Amino acid sequence: MDYDLLETFVLLCENRNLTKTAELLYKTQPTITSRIKTLEEKLGYSLIVRGKGKKNVEITRKGGEFLIIAQKFLNLYEEIEVVQEKLSKTLLVSSISSLGSPIVANVCKKMAEDEEVNISIFTYQTIEAYELIAKKELDVAFVSEARNVNGVMCEPVFMQDYYVIRPCKNPEGIKKICTEDLDVNYEIYQRWSDDFKMWHDYKFASKKPRIEVDSCALLKQFLTNETYWSIIQRSNLLLLNQEMSLQIYNLIDSPPARICYMLTNYYPDRGNIYLLKKMKKLLHQYAFDNDLQLTPN
């Protein structure tokens, strides 16, 4: 039985609307109608009832019975793909820049070591990533903002806290500090997320930092003496702390933890199902190994 026909029928049963189904599958409505008609002709009975000029449909009794079989077929297809894990050889990955290094880079490196797969890694902003995932022009993307976009599955995978850092020749472990003890005139500011900006504006009375950067590579260039400081997420702290001597502080009145989301298409290419599951597993392992907080599934 043709996978596309079954997929279309199951999705139509879930939302009972031809237009919605067409949008989710990025097909025209006539294509959806044609697929259902083809499936009905193969089976020899009607699956749906549609009123003239109406977009909503009703499932026939036999259609409801066949739905159970169709769902089993789709699950079987997925199981076959897991067994045939070597089928897919290419994975297109995107990440916002603040998650790309070291998190996504390390996960992709481990993936390449474990699997015979070609990986292409791109840097896209959040809006672009959602659009490309919906169009199946990317297989997986990592962002820090959850959005409701047709055809895109958005899963929280881990959270990470923030720390204050200063250059220091002789650091003394992790200390505690309050925002009241920080002079915004000497801050090297990086806008990690909208939630972080709201917190920062509130805590520092909307005072604008004199220096703002958009990457850790730039941040490092400005942390030249102990006067300057910055607030940084844990994953980037781990990387910077290997490259320079830093005094690290826990913020007493810290901003909300930053969540990393994994984006995939609701109906990914069947050959990539195994690799996407493997990437999620590796991401969880990386988060666990580096004391990042796993989000509940």
Image: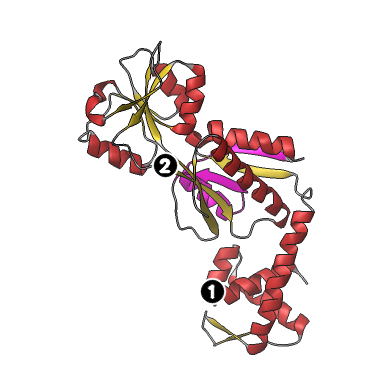
Element marked by disc 2: strand
Q: How many marks?
A: 2
Q: Quadrant of the N terminus?
A: bottom right
User: In the image, 87: left or right of 156?
Assistant: right
The percent coordinates of residue 67 (x first, y second) are 66, 78
Residue receiving disc 2: 258
The percent coordinates of residue 48 (x first, y second) are 62, 84
CB-based contact (under 8 Å), mark 2 and mark 1: no
Q: Residue furthest left?
A: 205
User: In the image, 145: left or right of 27?
Assistant: left
Residue 47 appears in the figure: no
Q: Amino acid at mark 1?
A: Asn
Distance from disc 2 to disc 1, alpha carbons, whole Å, reads: 33 Å
Please report the residue visible at 58 percent of the width from the left and 44 percent of the height from the top: 284
Q: Nearer the viewer, residue 109 or 169?
A: 169
Residue 265 occupies quadrant: bottom right
Q: Which dot marks residue 15? A: 1
Asked if the magenta segment contains residue 136, the reply would be yes
Residue 56 appears in the figure: yes
> Magenta region: which residues?
118-144
Closer to the camera: disc 2 or disc 1? 2
Element marked by disc 1: helix
Q: Is residue 201 positioned above or below 264 on the image?
A: above
